[in-house]
Amino acid sequence: ASGASVDASASSPALTALRGVQLKRAADGEAVDAASVVPATGRVLVPFLTQFADFDSWELAQKLVDDLPRLEEAGVAVVAVGIGSVASARAFCDKTNFPIDKLHADETGSAYAALQFAPGFGREGGAFGWL
């Protein structure tokens, strides 16, 4: 799992890369533009989880659940993105107690590709991609 500190201004290269990328809200499955889920003003924490069954993602989500009250007090919005289906995102929230309204599903990994994240172990373009 990786966290990204993104400048939420309209000129942010990360937000520009995310424009046109489709995510789905875990709460209702509604498709949204990835750039639109990041608040335009204020501070925001955007953790990009790996996939919803990954233990690293679970640990990060559980830690964030504990820290959410302090983050909210400090005026930091939290918007998380994970790879997988909406059903998997909902199950993830059920198991980790992560707030469903703060989670988005990237069913194809498009946001990760747009941000040029490494595809992971054993995948084309990642470590040991030849496997």
Image (tube, helix red, strand yellow):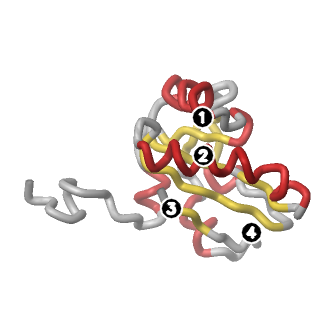
Q: Which mark is residue 8?
A: 4
Closer to the N terminus: mark 3 or mark 4?
Answer: 3
Q: Characterize the local packing of mark 4: few (<14), some (14-19) or many (20 or more) Cα atoms within 10 angstroms.
A: some
Residue 105's x, y, as percent?
54, 38
Residue type marked 4: Ala
Q: CA distance from mark 2 to mark 4?
A: 22 Å
* Nearer mark to the viewer, of 4 and 1: 1
Residue at image mark 1:
96
Q: CB atoms at circles 1 and 2 under 8 Å apart? A: yes
Q: Considering the numbered disc 2 on the image, is that residue within a helix, a strand or a loop?
A: helix
Q: CA distance from mark 3 to mark 4?
A: 18 Å
Quarter of the figure with the C terminus: bottom left
> For the point 67% across and 50% down, which residue is it?
64
Q: Considering the numbered disc 4 on the image, is that residue within a helix, a strand or a loop?
A: loop
Closer to the N terminus: mark 2 or mark 4?
Answer: 4
Task: Tell me the quarter of the picture where residue 93 sits.
Answer: top right
Residue at image mark 2:
61
Q: CB atoms at circles 3 and 2 under 8 Å apart? A: no
Q: Is residue 73 above or below residue 50?
A: below
* Nearer mark to the viewer, of 3 and 4: 3
Q: Nearer the viewer, residue 90 or 108?
A: 90
Residue at image mark 3:
2
* Nearer mark to the viewer, of 1 and 3: 1
Task: Tell me the quarter of the picture where residue 101 sits.
Answer: top right
Q: CB atoms at circles 2 and 4 under 8 Å apart? A: no
